Amino acid sequence: MKRLIFYTLIFLIALAAETHAQSFQPTWGNVCTNCIPTGYELVSGSPAIATPKGIGGNGKPWSPWSIADYDFPVPPTYNQGEQSNLSSESKKSFLTLKHLNHPKIDKRDVVRVVVSKFIPGKLYNFKLHTLFSEPFELSGTDESAAAISATVTISTGGVSPTILKTITINNTGNYNWKQTAIGFTPSTDVLVFTFSVNAASSTTGYANFDIGTYPFDCVIPTGQVQLFHSNKTTRYPCARTGLDALEKSISPPNGTLIWKKVNFSSGEDLHPNLISAVPVGEYYAFYRDQTMPSCYNVQTSTAKAVFTYIAEQVPLNKISLTNECPKNNVDLGNAFAMSLPDEEVRYFLNNTHQGVHVIDPSAVSQSGDYYAFYYNKKYNCYSTDLSTSKVTVTINACCAAGTAQVALLRSGAVNSCPATTVNLNSSTVSNQPQGASLVWFKDASHTVAVADPTKAGAGSYYAFFKDNATGCFNTDLSTSKLTVSINACDTKVSLNLKVFLQGPTTQEGGVATMRNDLQVYKTGPSTFGLLPTQDPYGGDAVYPEIKNTFSKAGNVVDWVKVEIRSMQNPSMILESKSLLLRVDGTVLDVDGFAPKFNPQFGGVRIAVKHRNHLPVIGLGLVSFNAGTANYDFSADLSKAYNVGAPPQMVLTNGVWCMISGDIQQDFTVDNADLSSERISFNNGNFDTYKLEDLNLDGIVDNVDISFFKISFNKGYFSTLINY
């Protein structure tokens, strides 16, 4: 059963040992008695791992050899550099087997080991060393002696193994390690090696075995590696090339192609990572047996690959370049027109590539000698440290204005009101050279310059480019003509103004509005309206249709007076107009349009006055010299300018309104206004256009009194009182 299990395991062991193909399990190891080396199987008996000191290696009285340890020969594997990983006590160790051969007992030490990856049908030569010795004989023990022979059997695996070879090694009496070579031809790739010894009758015989890691003779075929290409050159000292595609011959079975920097097999291997990218140098190819690393196809290789660096100058098409005006530079690429992968041509102003190279060779604007170098972008080096490839560049001065006509994108221009002139420099040009300005003349031969191109009137104008440094022109006769037409413009400023009065302000559908009671007040069976057709502020504005809601102004609340004042000096009234206030807060002129005022420079403030509300003055408008100006007092309290006074407007139904109660128009709600309000109230005035009618409904009643008391009690007054 034990045999069956062993042979069943042979296949598994062979698989596990595949990476060590045709290597052997050595017979040395940690010294011990009744033990076997790693990887071996005990068939029978009680073997040991011994040293020259004795069985077990510990020198105890029962284990030393009969010959002193300093006379006991050191095993050959130790001398060959193996066993370096063992402790000092276990160095020089070997396998010891014995045979107890007595009439009543026959007990034999037998061990075996499985080796894989053989090539069936190929002749192998297996080498081992044996030494026959005897331990020191102690009193009262059985007779011990050296064994008379040792037996090595090589067989196939499996349940019914086939013995390929059995060798008996006889004890010749020479007390030294004896090498024996066993030739065999495997029939399978997995073999079993079995070791035992034979003792003389009535003795216990001992023999020792020393087998290294690679005990087989090389079986790799001899002959040089054949290469496709043996020489390759490069123009870069830093370049690299691959060796992995040079093998022409076919690697033998179990053979691996390796490279070395020397031609002898004991030299150091080239690292695998370098093979695909070796630097400049010489490299030698070998085949090495995968299973026996010390076995090479040859000891000295002539299969040499040479990678040689040969410095190379850049071949130039031209040795001199000069700019062609209007260009003030040259393209060094015109001197070398070759496209190179992973490399480029670089130019320097010296012949030793010192400093910074020319960044843009296509636009060199400095005269001088430019030296060309091949540069490897992948490995970052130059082909040579001393260039003789020189291009002499000459840059002649050119007029920066060039020679082309000005490319205007339009041939005509018209003023945009309120401007009454055209800015010629706003004309789009598609080809203006760097370092040149666009200039304008009234004639095609740049004789009469335009005094101010930003304010050109009607007429024809000719465009030129002018060099900013030298003053030269692109041409002496321009065909780039721009014709300017001037349309008449309204020079007045249109004012979109919005303001609400506290008294008549109400809401309709959630939207703030003002009542136009005075416009629609019924005064008789077929008459209505209390608003005067002549403005009530002493001006000459007249609106005969003021009582008609379908007239140009529509639904009118009342007349207001609008003043344009200086922003820096608000006491200065620049212009004023009596205007109509609509129910939505907009202010219109008697023509039904937004009022127009004279343009002002330096900024203005808008002031609005009403006959029984405190006047307001707005924040400054910086621009009031053309076009349309917009101002909305109702949007925010901050729209009314305030200089230390109480709030200038009150919030009513969601909009900010002028404050009611200034009946005397003295910019404050005070006792004088109170007296007028009481008199009118006591008189029961109605159907009348009165100052005391604060809510503008045609009647002086308790509502007006209520408005007045609130304003009076809060002490409201207008900022305009300061001006």
Image (tube, rainbow, N blue to C red):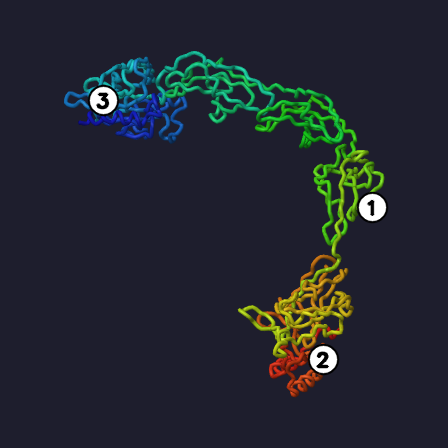
Marks 2, 1: nearer the viewer: 2
Q: How many C-alpha atoms fall within 10 Å of the one at disc 2: few (<14), some, or many (≥20)? A: some
x and y, in percent, of residue 98 in the image: 24, 23
Which residue, given by chain and number where applicable, does mark 2 sit on? 664
Look at the numbered discs 3 and 2 and tell me whether their residues touch, using CB distance below 8 Å: no
Marks 3, 2: nearer the viewer: 2
Instruction: Determine the CA span between mark 3 and mark 2.
Output: 134 Å
Residue 667 visible in the displayed image? yes
Which residue, given by chain and number where applicable, does mark 3 sit on? 158
Judge from the rendering whether residue 2 lies leftward or rightward of residue 79; answer left or right.
Answer: left
Q: Amino acid at mark 3?
A: Gly
x and y, in percent, of residue 481 in the image: 76, 39
Q: Which mark is residue 524?
A: none
Judge from the rendering whether residue 402 lies leftward or rightward of residue 305; answer left or right.
Answer: right
Which structural element holds mark 2? loop
Q: Amino acid at mark 1?
A: Ala
Instruction: Determine the CA span between mark 1 and mark 3.
Output: 115 Å
Instruction: Determine the CA span between mark 2 and mark 1.
Output: 57 Å
Q: Earlier in the sequence, mark 1 or mark 3?
A: 3
Which residue, given by chain and number where applicable, does mark 1 sit on? 451
x and y, in percent, of residue 385 in the image: 66, 24
